[in-house]
Image (cartoon, rainbow, N blue to C red):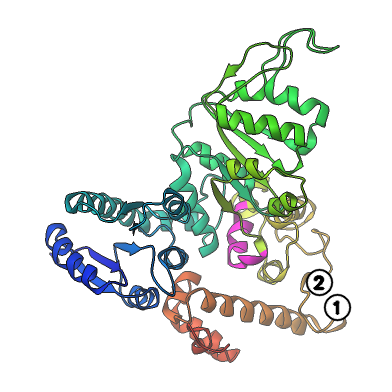
């Protein structure tokens, strides 16, 4: 039986004496392999060259500082365990590091035993994540993640972030265009939290008139206004112990913004017509498809409320940024909306699937689901057709040079669509893996030799996608 390798720790500090001290003491007490780097760029080179279980980063370094390095490490490996160290003890810097994905921080000069304790906890966390990573990756390729579907790096990063935030019990702001799954992400946060057995209450802010939204959120007492014939609990009270999801938060009025800020700060509010406050234990998750920073600059959204809501941000990627997820989503929606199973179930033929992958999807996942639902209902045969979903072939593939596929023979039109799909898919796979053909083929779930044959057919070179190469 092969023994597992020792944990590998990357220590980054611009002070050579500190690196020597940490290498000697930490390596012995933690029984781990220590690799050091004197700069952020040096650290990135080492990080790319070999696997690490943990990184200990100094925040203040010349050139690329620790926070910038942290962001680069998280971009390359979302959820990677990082402990930060700083000689300044500024809580603002530490909080910023945690928001950017750091697991923990420690202040210089630090006690040696305390440092070892922090690193042991971090290594244990990394070990547990590593044990579950492969299983979770397999699960995500064939199943949904709390209703969200996707095996692309963009969605895997979202899944990792939601898992990390599930039990954090902090306010989260979910951003992204309409139809990207912000509602599902909010539910995932609730289901992953210790509040999962308590209520999940959603309010769509734009659909509630401004003069009613306050009473909906905070409730009112009998006689508070003309039609208040009885006491009514607000949504904050309905969500007590659970999660309140404020969808499209950017559309609320300044008056509601002020009262919402008070609830987030004090955990209590006063219903309309009451002379005493009500305390609540609610986790608030908000979502928006607008640029709240632009609205702050225009004086339309309170800055203090924004920072209360956006303790951590989850960005939902548009469907156009993850075309490799479209076949998975198509299968998912076919299974959901098919009226029959087995041999009589509907399917999307390869020609139409190629068109779906090439489509820009301004309505994102919601647009795709509606299209598949329509295709299942309107297609007479087993195959979903472009006519059934209301598409003209030329309109589906914007990048094709011809504007009318019907003007050319079927076989030529089919080859044109598939050619564009193959070029786009293979190039995207190589972009995501930095030109690594083996990884790109594995991610695409096709044989490496087949992947290379497609590359040769369309004259696509892997070295054009390697880091630092000119594309």
For this view, does 50 lie left or right of residue 152? left
- Dot 2: few (<14), some (14–19), or many (≥20) neighbours within 10 Å? some
Asked if residue 73 is positioned above or below residue 29 in the image, the reply reads below
The residues tagged by marks 2 and 1 sit, at their Cα atoms, a distance apart of 8 Å
For this view, does 71 lie left or right of residue 369? left
Could you tell me residue 346's position as x and y percent? 67, 55
Could you tell me residue 444's position as x and y percent? 50, 71
Dot 2 and dot 1 residues touching (CB under 8 Å): yes
Asked if residue 78 is positioned above or below residue 128 in the image, the reply reads below
- Residue 378 visible in the snapshot: yes
Judging by the rendered image, the residue that carries numbered circle 1 is 406
Q: Is residue 330 magenta?
A: yes
Residue 393: mark in rendering: 2
Instruction: Give, as a single range, the part of the protein colored magenta.
Output: 320-332
- Dot 1: few (<14), some (14–19), or many (≥20) neighbours within 10 Å? few
Asked if residue 434 is positioned above or below residue 390 in the image, the reply reads below
Q: Nearer the viewer, mark 2 or mark 1?
A: 2
Pick whichever, 434 or 469, lies toward us: 469
Name the residue located 60 percent from the left edge and 89 percent from the top edge: 458
Pick whichever, 308 or 147, lies toward us: 308
């Amino acid at each position: 039986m092969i023994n597992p390798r020792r944990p590998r720790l990357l220590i980054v500090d611009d002070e050579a004496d500190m690196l020597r001290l940490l290498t000697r003491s930490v390596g012995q007490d933690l029984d781990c392999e220590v690799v050091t780097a004197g700069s952020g760029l040096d650290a990135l080179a080492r990080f790319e060259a070999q696997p690490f279980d943990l990184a200990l980063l100094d925040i203040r370094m010349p050139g690329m500082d620790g926070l910038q390095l942290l962001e680069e490490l998280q971009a390359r490996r979302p959820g990677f365990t990082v402990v930060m160290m700083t000689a300044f003890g500024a809580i603002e810097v530490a909080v910023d590091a945690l928001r950017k994905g750091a697991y923990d921080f420690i202040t210089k000069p630090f006690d040696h035993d305390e440092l070892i304790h922090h690193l042991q906890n971090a290594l244990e966390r990394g070990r547990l994540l590593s044990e579950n990573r492969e299983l979770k990756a397999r699960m995500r390729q064939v199943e949904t993640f709390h209703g969200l579907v996707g095996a692309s790096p963009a969605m895997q990063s979202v899944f990792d972030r939601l898992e990390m935030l599930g039990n954090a019990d902090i306010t989260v702001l979910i951003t992204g265009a309409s139809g990207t799954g912000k509602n599902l992400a909010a539910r995932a946060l609730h289901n992953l939290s210790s509040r999962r057995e308590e209520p999940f209450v959603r309010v769509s802010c734009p659909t509630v008139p401004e003069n009613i939204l306050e009473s909906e959120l905070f409730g009112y007492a009998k006689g508070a206004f003309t039609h208040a014939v009885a006491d009514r609990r607000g949504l904050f009270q309905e969500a007590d112990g659970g999660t309140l999801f404020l969808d499209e938060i950017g559309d609320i009025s300044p008056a509601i913004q002020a009262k919402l800020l008070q609830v987030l700060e004090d955990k209590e509010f006063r219903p309309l017509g009451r002379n005493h406050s009500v305390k609540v234990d609610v986790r608030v998750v908000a979502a928006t498809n607008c640029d709240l920073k632009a609205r702050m600059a225009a004086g339309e959204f309170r800055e203090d409320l924004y920072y209360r809501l956006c303790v951590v941000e989850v960005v939902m990627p548009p469907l156009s940024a993850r075309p490799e997820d479209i076949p998975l989503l198509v299968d998912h929606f076919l299974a959901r909306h098919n009226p029959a199973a087995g041999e009589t179930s509907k399917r999307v033929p390869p020609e139409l699937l190629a068109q779906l992958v090439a489509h820009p999807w301004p309505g994102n996942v919601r647009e795709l689901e509606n299209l598949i639902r329509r295709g299942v209902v309107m297609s007479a045969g087993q195959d979903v057709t472009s006519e059934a979903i209301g598409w003209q072939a030329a309109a589906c593939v914007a990048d094709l040079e011809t504007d009318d596929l019907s003007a050319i023979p079927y076989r030529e039109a089919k080859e044109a669509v598939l050619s564009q799909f193959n070029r786009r898919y293979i190039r995207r796979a190589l972009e995501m893996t930095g030109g690594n053909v083996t990884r790109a083929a594995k991610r695409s779930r096709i044989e490496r030799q087949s992947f290379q044959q497609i590359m040769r057919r369309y004259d696509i070179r892997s070295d054009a996608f390697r880091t630092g190469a000119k594309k």
